[in-house]
Every structure is written in structure tokens, then in C-alpha cells.
Image (cartoon, rainbow, N blue to C red):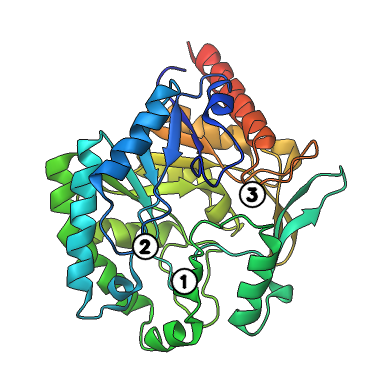
Amino acid sequence: MANLKMGFRWFGQKDDPISLAEIRQIPQTKQVVGALFDVPVGEVWPQEKIDALKKQVEDAGLKLEVIESVNIHDDIKIGLPSRDQYIVNYIQTIKNLSKAGIKVICYNFMPVFDWLRTDLHHQLADGSNAMMYEESKLPKDPKDLMAEMTSGSHGFSLPGWEPERLAALKDLFAAYKDVDAEKLRENLKYFLDAVIPVCEKYDVRMAMHPDDPPKPLFGLPRIFKDRDDMIKIEQLHESRYNGFTICTGSLGENPLNDLPSIIREFVPKDRVPFMHVRNIKYVGENAFHESAHPSSEGSLDMFDIMKALHDTDYDGYIRPDHGRNIWGEDGRPGYGLYDRALGITYLLGLWEALEKTSN
């Protein structure tokens, strides 16, 4: 089990009710997946702030080697002339993170919206609540969606939903009006061609996160939805530093995505430095809710997923992903303590069984 680098996403002392001391008590969890959330998207992450976060994590007896996320400025995704300065800033952030010993940067290339759901606190039969997506309930006006997400956050910031940026929603949609999937992919290549040589020099791997949900929404393109998209992204810049975060939940939202097969194809090519492993439950066409991690609780076969990782000798970083709010916890949607801790224990149990039966 030593080759799995188990981590837990943490939103910082100011904005996370979960403490580092609590994370340390989760068995075999040595990594904190963190970020700076008070630096506007596109600006350089100051070295002193990175170092302060690293010290805080290490003082708690944990490691900080994965950052999730260093978000990409919209001007880069749109392809505006101003993108060059934002790429220069991103490169400096990579260098600064490297000095602090960061090995992986998780990022996404989704236009306007990061992940989205239609209900952040869907009540489940067992009394817990979880995030849910029902396409039939998606508002026609994205402004209404933004209002629903904000009100449903219960006062917590939502990763990828920067209120300052989304305040100009109408202008953002106008700026993306000529950006189709092909253009967005071209702009991703422009970005990767600039940053990957720096990543190679400073030994920091980029790990692109899938689109969530993995389909076009509100007329906006999506370019990381499935295996074919991964092949195209891989070919944009041939390097192990141009990698993926395989999120079983995000890719699994499309039942046609064969997750074990995707793992077996891309892990041996050394393109997967980071895994998000979670389960979801299909409840209709284009509808699902988050679930507890065990296979019995959702629609994904978590044993097959972990077996694919074991069979391919995966030794990268991994974390549980969106869990339920259970046992009276009213935490950040998807990011409570208890269900994610249970998820870690379950995943490690599967891994131990795979280890012992393969010897």
C-alpha cells in the first residue's frame, strides 16, 4: 500500500471548518491537496504565501505536494492578446511552486463555469445529503444557475466559482461567443506549448481535470469529456508533464465512459499523476447524485477502478472526492470530513485486498 500517495483536499484555515489535525487522524493520509484562494485568477502566486501554506501543512505533520487548482485566466481560454501576460504569470507561479516542492498542479480548461450542480443539498433516503445534477432542472438563464449555486453554498466559497469573475457573466459569455471546441483546443495547445517546457525544467507536472458534467452546456464547448478527448489533449504536447487528473466521478457521469479501460490505457503511458476517486448514482437520463464511495452505494464499480490502478502499478497521488454530508455535518457541499474519511478507509481496504491477493 506504500505506493499510493493518499491525500485530502483542504481549503485553508480561513475557509475550511476541517482542521489539519483532523486530517492527520485519517489512516494513511499523509498528503494535503491545497491551494491559495486569496490570489485573483491570473496573478502570480507570491512565494511567501506558498511557503506559509507549506509550513502550516508540514507543521501539522503532513505533506503538500499537489496543488488544486491554479486556475486558468479566461483570456487564455478565449485566446485574447492579453493571454501572453497571464501565461507569463502562470509560468512564474509554476517556478514558485517548484521552489516549495510542489510536484503536481491540477487545473481545468472549462469555459466560464467550473463544475456545476442543480442541487447542492439533495436529501437522500438515509438522511444524509449530497450534491445532485438533473439536466431537466438546469435553468435556461445561467444567471439563475449562479444564484442557485450561491444560495446553496451555505456561505462557503465554491472552488472554481469566483464571484468577482462571474459578476460579469453577460460579458464573459459574449467573450466566448466565437470559441468552439476546436478553438478552445487550439488555445489549450498555445498554453501547453508555453508552460510544459518550464514544467519539465522545474519538475512540476500538469494534470488536467475532466469537464464536469462532461458535455457542452449553455452553448459553451467542453474538450475533456472522454477517452477520445484525452488522446487529442495528449497529442497537443507530447510530454509526461502534460498529464491528466482522472476523476472517476466527472468522467463517470457519462455511462459510456469505461473508467477501468481509460485507467489501463493512460496510467502505463505515465500520463496520470493524480486521481480523484469517487462514486455517483445514476437516477435517470442525464441525472445523478453524489454517493458514498462503496460500489454498493452508487453506479460505478469501485473495485474494478481500484483493480485497474493496481494492475497498472499506479504510484501517484490520489484522493477521495465529493462525499455526502453525514452525521449532522453541514460542511462545504461535497467536502465534508466524515464521508471523505470513510471513502479513504474504503479505498485503502480495497487496495490492501488487491495487494495481498496478488502476492
Left or right? Give the position of 191 relative to 28: left
**For the residue marked with disc 2, what is the amino acid?**
Pro
Tag nearer the camera, 1 or 3? 1
Position of residue 173 measured from the top left corner of the image (x, y, whole percent): 45, 84
Position of residue 251 measured from the top left corner of the image (x, y, whole percent): 53, 55
- In this rendering, the answer to whether 20 lies above or below 130 is above
Observer-nearest residue: 306 or 273?
A: 273
Describe the element under mark 2 as helix, strand or loop: loop
Q: Which residue is mark 1?
A: 164
Left or right? Give the position of 50 relative to 277: left
**For the residue marked with disc 1, what is the amino acid?**
Glu
Position of residue 213 measured from the top left corner of the image (x, y, whole percent): 56, 63
Tag nearer the camera, 2 or 3? 2
From this viewpoint, is residue 200 visible?
yes
Q: Which residue is mark 3?
A: 332
How far, Cα to Cα, is label 1 from label 2? Answer: 9 Å
How far, Cα to Cα, is label 2 from label 3? Answer: 21 Å
Lower sequence index among marks 1 and 2 = 2
Lower sequence index among marks 1 and 3 = 1
Q: What's the residue at 30%, 75% (across, down)?
A: 75
Lower sequence index among marks 2 and 3 = 2
**For the residue marked with disc 3, what is the amino acid?**
Arg
Q: Which numbered marker is on residue 40?
A: 2
